[in-house]
Image (spheres, helix red, strand yellow):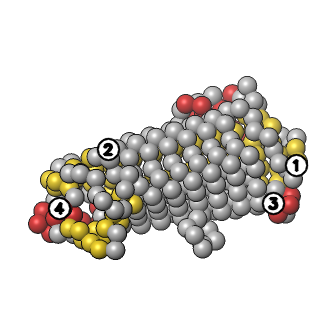
């Protein structure tokens, strides 16, 4: 069975829940079965065919959406393989709880993109809203694995309670970047807002752009880490843009957050 192409007919009146649409969930379905898949629309449901024109297309295990999906939430929710491509914007929770596969959004994504992501790759060509790569409301663990690459800007609380994985922002990031971070790697190519690393316990936050002000609860550390930095910088450099020259740049490390008995690090890459 080939993949599927979905072309949006018109914007829905209310927000739509897309969590039932993953490559694995549609495997082996006929076009008639796909057309009748129910999607949450407010407090009711709509058949998929009421919102999209549907056609088989592309390689097996792939879903391709065309149109502005700003009102469509949970695209790629709990995705565990295959590929999803969104040729436009996406709503909230894009790539949430994702475990494997690739989700590529050619526009921007809403709130909580890659929340509690455990594996796979999420690429957002535009911006992401607040709490990307972070935790769902009421949960204790944020992003747990995989890779998030944002080519635009990110909102506040990016990587809040992040536990594992890699999250990159080519542009600017809002306040409280990496707050309450437990482990993992965050890298920012542009400017970062206030209070970066607040409550951080472990992990690394790399600033490839203008130097941010470190909280007073972080202390400079002058211990040489050439092997660690060489490996980390080379891994980040493959994403290009502001990270391309990291292997050749000197760094300054600050350890903390000491107010949370933390052992994380803020890495400022100088010219």
| Vertical position of residue 71 compared to residue 25: above or below | above
Q: Nearer the viewer, mark 3 or mark 2?
A: 2
Residue at 17% from the left image edge and 61% from the top image edge: 49
Disc 1 from disc 2: Cα separation: 43 Å
Which percent across, then down, holds residue 188?
A: 63, 41
x then y, percent, for residue 135: 58, 65
Residue 87, numbered circle: 2
Density class for disc 1 (Cα within 10 Å; few <14, some 14-19, many ≥20) is few
* Percent position of residue 195, x then y: 76, 50
Q: Where is mark 1, residue-wise?
A: 216
> How much space separates mark 3 and mark 2, taking CA atoms?
41 Å
Mark found first going from the N terminus, 1 or 2? 2
Which of marks 1 and 3 precedes in the sequence? 1
Q: Write down the residue under mark 3.
A: 262
Label 2: few (<14), some (14–19) or many (≥20) C-alpha neighbours in 10 Å = some
Secondary structure under tag 4 reads helix
Query: Where does the C terminus fall, quadrant-wise?
Result: top right
Numbered disc in front, either 1 or 4: 4
The label on residue 49 is: 4
Q: Nearer the viewer, mark 3 or mark 4?
A: 4
Do the CB atoms of the residues marked 4 and 2 lie less than 8 Å apart?
A: no
Q: Name the element at disc 1.
A: loop
What's the mark number on residue 135?
Answer: none
Image marks 3 and 2: residues in contact by CB distance under 8 Å:
no
What residue lies at 26% left-to-right and 46% top-to-bottom? 66
Q: Nearer the viewer, residue 144 or 116?
A: 116
Which one is earlier in the sequence, the residue at label 1 or at label 4?
4
């Amino acid at each position: 069975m080939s993949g599927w192409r979905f072309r949006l007919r018109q914007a829905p009146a209310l927000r739509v829940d897309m969590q039932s649409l993953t490559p694995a969930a549609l495997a082996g379905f006929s076009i008639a079965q796909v057309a009748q898949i129910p999607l949450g629309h407010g407090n009711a449901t709509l058949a998929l065919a009421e919102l999209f024109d549907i056609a088989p297309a592309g390689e097996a295990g792939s879903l391709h959406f065309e149109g502005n999906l700003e009102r469509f939430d949970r695209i790629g929710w709990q995705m565990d393989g295959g590929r999803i491509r969104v040729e436009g914007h996406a709503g909230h929770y894009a790539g949430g709880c994702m475990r494997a596969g690739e989700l590529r959004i050619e526009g921007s994504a809403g709130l909580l993109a890659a929340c509690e992501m455990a594996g796979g790759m999420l690429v957002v060509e535009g911006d992401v809203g607040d709490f990307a790569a972070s935790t769902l409301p009421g949960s204790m663990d944020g992003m747990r694995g995989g890779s998030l690459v944002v080519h635009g800007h990110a909102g506040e609380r990016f990587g809040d309670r992040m536990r594992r994985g890699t999250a990159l922002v080519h542009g600017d990031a809002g306040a409280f970047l990496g707050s309450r971070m437990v482990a993992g790697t965050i890298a920012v190519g542009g400017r970062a807002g206030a209070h970066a690393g607040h409550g951080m316990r472990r992990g690394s936050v790399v600033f490839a752009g203008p130097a941010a002000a470190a909280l007073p609860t972080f202390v400079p550390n002058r211990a040489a880490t050439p092997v660690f930095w060489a490996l980390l910088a080379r891994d980040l450099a493959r994403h290009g843009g502001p990270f391309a020259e990291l292997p050749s740049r000197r760094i300054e490390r600050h350890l903390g957050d000491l107010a949370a008995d933390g052992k994380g690090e803020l890495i400022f890459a100088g010219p």
